[in-house]
Amino acid sequence: MPGNSKRRGAVRAADRPQRTVGSGGQRRRGLAGKGPTPPAAERVGHPAARRAARTAGTTRRPRPATTEDEALHIGGHHAVSEALQAGVPCRALHVLAGGAPDGRLRAVLDLAGERGCPVHSESRATLDGLCPGQVHQGVVLVVPPFEYRTLAEVLPVAGQSTASLFIALDGITDPHNLGAIARSAAAFGADALLLPGRRSAQVTPGAWKASAGAFARLPVARVPNLTGALRRLGTAGMFSCALLTRGGTPLDAVDRDLLRAPLVLVIGSESAGVSRLVAATCDTTLSIPVSSRVESLNASVAAGITLQWIAHVRGAAPRRGRDF
């Protein structure tokens, strides 16, 4: 009933907690100055700060230093065996637990023992995690990150041999294509492989697997600019040829003396081919005669055909005794 202050649940105004005087210092702190506004170039997220970072060549999130997790995990009997035979520094060898070793695995274990490489038995799930998306065949070798050469380090090779052969890749972004080209390059006696630092596949576990261990025997130089590298190699006395899909001199019609000279063979991607600027920097262009019903060849296939023809012209038979 109205006016019945004694009903259940009623609370008198006098019984409610009363506010205390003051704000506990919150208003005073809110009115305190925060200092001068920092310059725009120092304010995180400001466009001027991003422009200043680009000018200085830095970013707000610098790339972390190389860690143990960045090691390469090479899977497969052939690739692991080639890496161990070539003396690549190894950190550990992981093999599938529970199975009887066959002849190939026994040979890998013997090589690991000679190298003093620790051997660990692991489950299939662990091996799958070390080599995601790869067919590791129950054996995974852990090696340090791949060490690239500089152009200056491979240049002496050009001066020591009258028939040096370098392979330069332009726009090859598929690691499997890179590994297959490296396999052909090693099989037909190439002296070095040149990779651009940007917009190019690098030596990853997938590329190493596709190369069947060829990266253990083939020097790989990473260059900041491919056209600049070609000009420098030209100054060192090497002749450069770009392999084109269409329009170049047919491979069987090229002057054989040219193919016997110190040579840089430039191979482009299957889709875009050799870029216009790189092709203009080369001394000449080549092409593989194909049927008009075929638009283009895979880059690794084209590289293998061309390298085999160069080896045939030079009279250098492919190496025997190993399955490349």
Image (cartoon, rainbow, N blue to C red):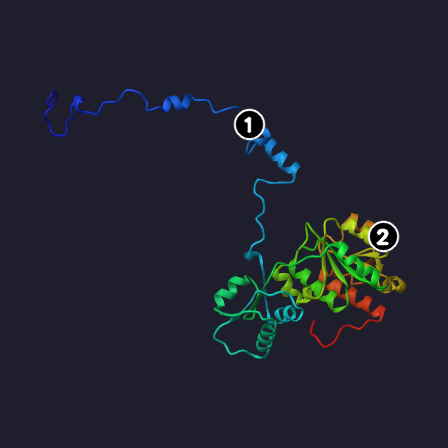
Q: Can residue 287 be seen at all in this image of the molecule?
A: no
Q: Is residue 31 above or below residue 309?
A: above
In x, y percent, where is residue 35? 50, 24
| Quadrant of res 321 | bottom right
In x, y percent, where is residue 97? 48, 73
Q: Nearer the viewer, residue 24 or 291?
A: 24
The residue at 69%/74% (across/down) is: 323
| Quadrant of res 251 | bottom right
Determine which residue is flagged by label 1: 38
CA neighbours of label 2 inside 10 A, class few (<14), some (14 to 19), many (20+): few
Marks 2 and 1, the one that precedes in the sequence:
1
Q: At label 2, which amino acid type do we have?
A: Thr
CA neighbours of label 1 inside 10 A, class few (<14), some (14 to 19), many (20+): few
Q: Which labelled disc corresponds to residue 235? A: 2
In x, y percent, where is residue 18? 23, 23
**Total labels drawn:** 2
